[in-house]
């Protein structure tokens, strides 16, 4: 629902968000009140000790204060339970109750100070039980006050005062065009500055140069564009994700049409091609995983990795000319050796240098497949995250091949960095001098997969036989023309409901619209959605059949915007819309549709278990196309399906299954 308005500004919390925290505090207050009441009743006639008069008044005032807070909390929780996300009408009296609750913090604060002073007074000689009870009361008071302050900081919206400029439709209609334009510019600038400050705060531990400042501004603009047109609070988004996940599970459980099943029955020629590519992918995924260095090796071998790496830290030490960047105690290089099974002499170049748009990679000789392998590391640092989030588009023109191709800006700059190192520094020339008959293979996972794909496009003219294997690459990477061009030499491997492979700005906009639509039309209160959703995610069962206002509507009606849905979108004036349309009418879209590179192998679980800890999993693979990944799927495995160890496990399982079938 729209954010709660208190003290003349919007807050990042809804009027229906007080049920669960309010119920928890109510339970604590009740236990506390009963304990103090029992303590006062038992020791009622025993306050003749030094300081006992103040103690008697303190306990009596505390009982009355707690009783008042309990009554207000009960009303707060009850009112917050009323209505639905898009129907805040039954909760219109909640701000008054909240003001009352906030006023009660003043006497509670005074009472906490009085209790602390009384406890610290050495002249008090009352019974030990009473003193311990007061100490517990003082500690509980300060804990609740501290958590309240933390909560206020968390739900504080720096743009809360600015949001109100969007809301009054009628008032904004009378504004002159210049006034409206200036107002729009001020709000946009304020929002961008707020996001930029947040990003700088998160990246405070890294050295910041001009590239970082440009990236901060670009990423802040991206977040501002994405969040500026909705009035959802974080709990609304959580409820929407829960509803979407259960809706998706219900659709997956529906029996498929016979034609839909038959369309996935591949020919023997396609199956043979798929099996060969799966075998190659399983082999080269080791190189892509090894590029992560010791963090991946320790993650996959938590009990023995450190001992093994410590034992080898003084051996196989590369010379300064072989390696660039920091590798303390030789842990990165030692991990790469153990994961790939190669010898030191097989490595041509290793770079652990890491800055924004400059990511680590290594070049090695793979004698088993007779290939020169360029392996690019995926996201593992704040600099890598900034590269990922630099999602503006830029042109990539290939002479005599393709014109006006759009690519992901941050990943393209990372590919340019590696391209310059490989060509200008003569790394590939050195490799082909050693093994002139070998073919060139470029691999990477996640950010590394996207970088490897664009790097392969850049090197394609110079090395026509090169191959690229992109494991779980970002979805918003290449324009349609470039994606089609890469089908001849790039293979992308996606596991399950991987989020990153579906991550693009158009897909994120689609997810936002789906969230707004489903939460606006669910006729259950938010606390029920969250509680039942948590139960479903943890313990499974059948998807809950949440009644919605969408039930019974015709398909044509579903394409029309709904009134409840419109209430969750920021109302804009006609001049605002005109300015937006005018600013984009003569320029290409900032975030056009971008797609996965090359041919796509989609690996899914045959009998998908909803348990994250399930170990007995069987996989199946098939050729897919980019349209399958045009929508973000909500699942507990949307993150784990992206992890390199899960991708490697799935590929090894399929490769072993194919090998056992051949032996039979």
Image: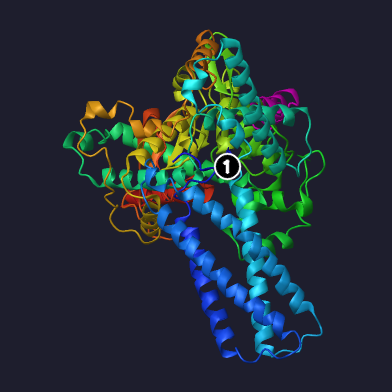
Residue 158, percent from left and from top: 64, 38
User: To which quarter of the image does residue 628 belong?
Assistant: top left
Q: In the depicted view, which residue is nearer to us: 41 or 424? A: 41
Q: Residue at x 38, y 49 (%)?
A: 659
Residue 467, percent from left and from top: 52, 29
Q: Which residue is drawn at 69% across and 65% down?
A: 110
| Residue 438 seen anywhere in this rendered image of the structure | no
Q: In this view, does 307 lie to the left or right of 230?
A: right
User: To which quarter of the image does residue 351 belong?
Assistant: top right
Give the residue furthest to the left.
258
Magenta range: 414-438
Which residue is labeled 1 in the image? 288
Sort mark 1 into few (<14), some (14-19) or many (20+) by Cα contacts within 10 Å.
many
Residue 545, percent from left and from top: 26, 50
Q: In this view, does 568 lie to the left or right of 295?
A: left
Q: Which residue is drawn at 48% across and 46% down?
A: 14
Query: How has the structure been colored for display?
Result: rainbow
Residue 545 lies, with reference to residue 359, above or below; the image says below
User: To which quarter of the image does residue 266 belong?
Assistant: top left
Residue 108 lies, with reference to residue 195, above or below; the image says below
Q: In the depicted view, which residue is nearer to us: 607 or 431? A: 607
Q: In the depicted view, which residue is nearer to us: 466 or 330? A: 330
Q: Does the magenta stretch include residue 565?
A: no
Residue 495, percent from left and from top: 43, 43
Q: Is residue 415 magenta?
A: yes
Q: Residue at x 43, y 45 (%)?
A: 92
| Residue 549 seen anywhere in this rendered image of the structure | yes
Q: Is residue 550 left or right of residue 325?
A: left
Secondary element at tag 1: helix
């Amino acid at each position: 629902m729209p954010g709660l308005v208190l003290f003349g500004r919007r807050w990042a919390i809804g009027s229906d968000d007080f049920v669960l925290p309010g119920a928890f505090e109510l339970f604590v207050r009740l236990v506390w009140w009963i304990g103090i009441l029992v303590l006062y009743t038992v020791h009622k006639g025993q306050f003749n000790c030094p300081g006992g008069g103040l103690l008697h008044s303190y306990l009596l005032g505390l009982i009355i204060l707690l009783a008042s807070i309990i009554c207000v909390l009960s009303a707060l929780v009850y009112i917050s339970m009323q209505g639905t996300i898009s129907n805040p009408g039954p909760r219109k009296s909640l701000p008054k109750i909240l003001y009352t609750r906030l006023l009660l913090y003043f006497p509670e604060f005074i009472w906490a100070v009085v209790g602390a002073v009384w406890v610290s007074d050495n002249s008090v000689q009352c019974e030990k039980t009473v003193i311990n009870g007061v100490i517990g009361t003082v500690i509980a008071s300060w804990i609740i006050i501290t958590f309240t302050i933390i909560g206020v900081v968390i739900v504080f919206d720096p743009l809360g005062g600015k949001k109100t400029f969007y809301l009054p439709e009628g008032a904004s209609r009378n504004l002159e065009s210049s006034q409206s334009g200036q107002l729009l510019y001020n709000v946009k600038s304020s929002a961008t500055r707020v996001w930029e400050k947040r990003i700088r705060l998160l990246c405070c531990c890294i050295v910041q140069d001009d590239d970082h400042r440009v990236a901060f501004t670009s990423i802040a603009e991206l977040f501002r564009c994405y969040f500026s047109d909705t009035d959802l609070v974080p709990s609304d988004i959580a409820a929407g994700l829960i509803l979407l996940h259960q809706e998706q599970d219900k659709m997956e459980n529906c029996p498929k049409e016979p034609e839909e099943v038959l369309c996935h029955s591949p020919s023997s020629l396609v199956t043979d091609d798929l099996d060969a590519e799966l075998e190659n992918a399983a082999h080269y995924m080791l190189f892509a995983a090894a590029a992560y260095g010791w963090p991946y090796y320790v993650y996959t071998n938590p009990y023995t990795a450190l001992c093994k790496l410590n034992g080898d830290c003084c051996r196989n030490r590369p010379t300064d000319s072989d390696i660039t960047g920091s590798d303390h105690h030789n842990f990165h290089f030692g991990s790469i050796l153990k994961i790939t099974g190669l010898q030191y002499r097989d490595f041509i170049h290793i770079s652990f240098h890491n800055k924004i748009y400059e990511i680590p990679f290594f070049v090695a000789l793979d004698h088993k497949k007779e290939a020169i392998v360029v392996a690019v590391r995926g996201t593992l640092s704040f600099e890598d995250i900034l590269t990922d989030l630099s999602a503006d588009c830029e042109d990539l023109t290939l002479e005599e091949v393709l014109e006006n191709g759009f690519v992901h800006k941050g990943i393209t700059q990372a590919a340019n960095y590696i391209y310059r190192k490989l060509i200008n520094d003569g790394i590939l020339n050195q490799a082909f001098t050693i093994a002139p008959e070998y073919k060139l293979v470029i691999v990477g996972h996640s950010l590394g997969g996207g970088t490897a794909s664009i790097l392969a496009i850049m090197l394609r003219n110079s090395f026509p036989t090169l191959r690229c294997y992109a494991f779980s690459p970002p979805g918003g990477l290449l324009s349609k023309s470039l994606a089609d061009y890469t089908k001849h030499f790039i293979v992308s491997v996606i596991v399950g409901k991987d989020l990153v492979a579906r991550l693009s700005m158009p897909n994120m906009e689609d997810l936002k619209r789906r969230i707004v639509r489903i939460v606006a039309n669910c006729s259950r209160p938010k606390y029920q959605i969250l509680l039942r959703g948590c139960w479903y995610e943890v313990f499974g069962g059948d998807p809950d059949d949440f009644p919605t206002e969408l039930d019974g509507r015709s398909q044509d009606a579903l394409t029309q915007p709904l009134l409840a849905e419109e209430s969750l979108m920021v109302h804009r004036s006609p001049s605002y819309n005109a300015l937006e349309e005018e600013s984009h009418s003569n320029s290409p879209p900032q975030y056009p549709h971008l797609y996965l590179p090359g041919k796509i192998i989609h690996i899914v679980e045959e009998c998908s278990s909803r348990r994250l800890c399930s170990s007995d999993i069987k996989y199946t693979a098939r050729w897919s196309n980019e349209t399958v990944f045009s929508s973000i799927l909500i699942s507990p495995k949307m993150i784990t399906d992206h992890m390199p160890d899960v991708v490697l496990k799935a590929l090894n399982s399929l490769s072993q299954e194919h090998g056992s079938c051949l032996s039979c």
